[in-house]
């Protein structure tokens, strides 16, 4: 029996089970909630091509599990899912994808707090505009895992320090690209000068290793300010210097790094963030440094107890140092979620992106639209 029939049959069964009450079960201290969904999607450019583009309609059945663990001083949650993209005409593009996110937080004392997050993706398409920016063009399978851990110690109510460790693993299945792994450690201190203003200082060290090739290292130091207009609205700015040891050119370079963000949770129903960053980054796609800037706007708004709208806008431009390859990505998306019943959600989503490049083969324009029904137990 084919995989698509297995997944499609399971999702159909879950739709039938919606006639019965919602179901969650206990596994030890974990509360487990199974879910499934079926999605119909249209993609105007499934290969990210500049010319001779091909479009198709895609059916995407999904199965997943959510797990929640709550203790006295700690919480954990887990979300895993698998899906198959089934193309209407171009069946050789059918593919399986898997996703896993895990989060853990614990208060060891009034002063010490731990937070650990991990995200795993096995897919074919990038999942966000940020992931799409600077990516080697084309359609190809990849494995990605992001690990993020932070230990915060509060010396007083006004001063704190955070120790950070991240690991980024990327393995693309495309000729000419190789797997890489970046480990980054750092420390950041915060001091509340007055109730509305915090002073920030940070120092980071990162090391990216490409399989069978040389590594790239980077040391970063800097500082910044965080200003609260209200307890929910704050502006944060950071500026620093990066000391980079690249693999291409073999000459150490120093470059500035600047970022600013506005975060606003106006009320319990509205959240938006606006951010800008200018930096020289090592990427998982090539050993060349990416000199870029990017700006991102994200908005979430609850229209009612049942309806939510979300939107995002992205623009960024970058050049691969030493190759003179310049790219500019513009993207926008909007979506709507409606809670049909306690156990059924309806989601509609539209995304548009356009990549400009001085290399004609890297140019493309892409639109996707989808309707999804999500069934919860």
Image (cartoon, helix red, strand yellow):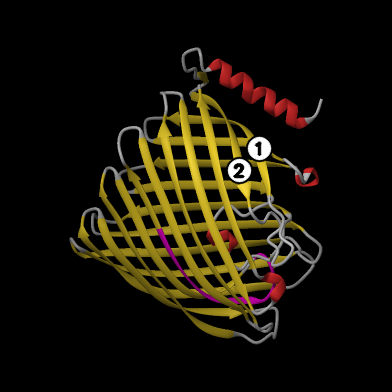
What residue appears at the point 54 percent right and 39 percent down from the top-left corner? 371
The part of the image, by quadrant, that contains residue 136 is: bottom right
Q: Position of residue 315 (x, y in %)?
A: 48, 68
Residue, disc 2: 41
Circle 1/circle 2 CB separation < 8 Å? yes
Q: Residue at x 69, y 86 (%)?
A: 249
Residue 67 sits inside the magenta stretch: no
When asked about the image quadrant of residue 82, the answer is top right
For the N terminus, give its image quadrant.
top right
* Residue picked out by circle 1: 59
Identified at 50% across, 21% down, the residue is 377
Q: Earlier in the sequence, mark 1 or mark 2?
A: 2
Q: Give x and y (percent) for residue 361.
A: 72, 71
The one of 259 and 310 positioned closer to us in this rendering? 310
Give 119 or 339, whichever is nearer the viewer: 339
Q: Residues within 10 Å of mark 1 (few under 14, many from 20)?
A: many
> Is 24 located above or below residue 264 in the figure?
above
Q: Main secondary structure of the magenta part?
A: strand
């Amino acid at each position: 029996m084919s995989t698509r029939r297995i997944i499609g049959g399971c999702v159909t069964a879950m739709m039938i089970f919606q006639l019965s009450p919602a179901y969650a079960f206990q596994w030890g201290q974990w509360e487990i909630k199974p879910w499934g969904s079926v999605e119909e999607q249209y993609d105007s450019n499934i290969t990210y091509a500049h010319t001779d583009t091909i479009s198709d309609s895609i059916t995407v059945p999904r199965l997943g599990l959510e797990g929640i663990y709550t203790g006295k001083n700690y919480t954990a949650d887990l979300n895993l899912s698998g899906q198959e993209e089934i193309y209407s005409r171009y069946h050789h593009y059918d593919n399986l994808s898997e996703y896993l996110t895990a989060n853990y937080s614990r208060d060891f004392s009034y002063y010490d707090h731990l937070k650990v997050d991990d995200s795993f993706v096995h897919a074919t398409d990038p999942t966000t505009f940020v992931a799409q920016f600077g990516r080697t063009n084309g359609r190809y399978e990849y494995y990605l895992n992001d690990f993020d851990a932070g230990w915060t110690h509060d010396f007083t109510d006004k001063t704190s320090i955070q120790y950070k460790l991240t690991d980024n693993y990327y393995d693309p299945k495309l000729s000419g690209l190789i797997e890489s792994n970046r480990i980054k450690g750092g420390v950041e201190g915060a001091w509340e000068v007055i109730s509305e203003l915090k002073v920030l200082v940070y120092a980071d060290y990162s090391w990216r290793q490409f399989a069978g090739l040389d590594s790239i290292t980077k040391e970063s130091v800097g500082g910044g300010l965080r200003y609260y207009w209200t307890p929910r609205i704050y502006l944060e700015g950071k500026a620093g210097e990066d000391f980079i040891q690249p693999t291409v050119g073999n000459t150490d370079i120093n470059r500035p790094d600047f970022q600013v963000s506005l975060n606003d949770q106006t009320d319990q129903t509205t959240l938006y963030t606006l951010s800008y960053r200018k930096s020289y980054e090592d990427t998982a796609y090539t050993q060349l440094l990416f000199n870029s800037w990017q700006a991102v706007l994200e908005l979430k708004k609850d229209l009612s107890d049942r309806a939510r709208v979300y939107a995002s806008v992205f623009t960024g431009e970058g050049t691969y140092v030493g190759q003179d390859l310049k790219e500019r990505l513009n993207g926008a998306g909007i979506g709507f979620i409606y809670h049909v019943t306690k156990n059924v959600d309806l989601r509609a989503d539209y995304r548009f992106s356009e990549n400009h490049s001085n290399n004609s083969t890297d140019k493309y324009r892409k639109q996707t639209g989808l309707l999804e029904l999500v069934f919860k137990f």
